Amino acid sequence: MTEATRFPAVADALVAVLAGVGAVAGSYAAVGLAPAFLGSPLERVLSRAMPGPVVAVAIERLGSVGQQLNLLLASLLTALAVAVLVWLAIRVGDQLRNRAVPVVLGAAFVWAATALVTVNFASATGAAAGAAFVVSTAGFLPVATASIGGSPDPVRRRVVGGVAAALGLGTVALTRSSPSPRPDQPLSADVPESVRESLELASERSLDVSGIEPLVSRDFYQVDINAADPRVDPDDWSLAVTGAVESVATYSLDDLRSMDERTEFSTLRCVGDSLNGQKLDNALWTGVPTEELIDAADPGGECDCVKLHAADGYFQVFPTEALRGGLLAYEMNGRDLPRGHGYPLRALVPGHWGEVQVKWLTEIEFLERDAEGYWEQRGWHGTGPVSTVAKLWAVDDLADGRKQVAGHAYAGTRGISKVEVSTDGGDSWNEATLSEALPGEDVWRQWVYEYDPPGGSHEVVVRAVESDGTLQSGTRREAFPNGATGWVSKTVQ
């Protein structure tokens, strides 16, 4: 085989790969980061295939970046799979010496494959259009490059045209974004006065410290089993109460909103949160007390346990008693739940790790016998009380030469009575200033401490004390499998 016959084949392969990228970009442009996105099915498979310890490292060390890398890997592998289909179409077109065949046949192959995988017309159409655009551009776009003899080089024309088309599609796709509203943005006029007053109270009681979140988080962390959150149509959605109950029931969102509601502050901490990590946040939630649905169902069963099901396939099991005192929330900070936080309904179970706070809730199933939840099956501890922690998130230099350190402290339903700070590595301790407590049994508090630095580097250590006087455990433990514990320390210059 000569060089002259090898280069067109290489160009065809490169164009096919670019068309695969174009298909992924076209799908994203059509449906966004949703389960119907072409890269999502493989991303879900990869996420579920990862062992618990690997997920622990990804959550603790990489945070949301780990999930984004997993989505990127899935999207690249999907693009390569699509490239094989496009390459077959290109080769058929080359054999027939017909430039239209790769475009039409490639689009048909990509549409059928995407429709089969995503079961979504818009995603399939976007993917097919993206692939067809790249192939057609690579085949017909005039490019001012010439080979020996002055005629346009067909190899460069195809590759450069394909690259330009793929980059163009990628740029269009990346313009899609729908950030969640921040709690400091204006509320609508119909928000109840009680919600406004609660948010104002949180603002008033927040310490004026640079580098830490106010008492109602501006940017609430998110950890999900999938990179693409479900898109649930509230008109088609319902909550089923099933299993070992006297009365099976189904509730629409209007049914739940018509019940007596409760608004309360509640803090969530991810079980994969590192000792001084950022996966700890607080919000004001509104919803239906879970007792109403439990009492109406009159559950039985020998295990006295319940399984919550989510629209994305996630599930969690915990004692029924833990659900009492909880909330089925449909609003967050005076607005409908953002999609990333479980719209239209999520569960809040006081004092438990964030992993059991099931989002996109679709079913409450009372069990006859105990079972493992999603994360327990992967080696995590699962339900149970959160570990007490005092975070050291801010170190500031004050104008008078003093140092200021600050953060948040959280102990679940046990509450925080004080935070102690050591500036000499734990040899002596002083009490920090706490923010005034917000109403609620499961709420964090801010703390701040100012001191004269001893000169040079020194070790600052912080620890929390629970409401009954119990001192936070100083035993250091990694997040996997039971949640991180220990006193946070930081070397300060």
Image: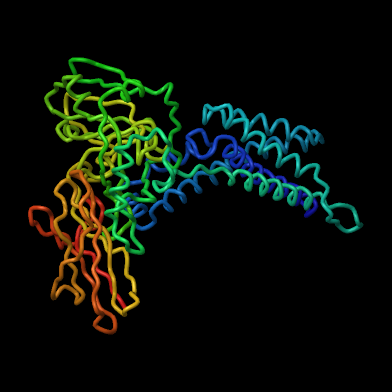
Residue at figure coordinates x 75%, y 44% from the top left: 138
Is residue 476 shown left or right of residue 346? left
Total numbered circles:
0
| 367, 460: nearer the viewer | 460
- Residue 405 or residue 280, whichever sits in front: 405
| Location of residue 274 (image quadrant) | bottom left
The image quadrant that residue 307 belongs to is: top left
306 relative position to 160: left or right: left
Rendered position, 421 above or below 33: below
Quadrant in which the C terminus appears:
bottom left
Residue at horizontal 36 percent and vertical 58 percent from the top: 61
Q: Quick check: can you spot residue 450?
A: yes
The image shows residue 341, relative to residue 113, as above or below, that is below
At 30% across and 34% down in the image, what residue appears? Answer: 329
Residue at the far right in the pictured view: 149
Q: Quadrant of residue 489?
A: bottom left
Q: In x, y percent, where is residue 198?
A: 29, 43
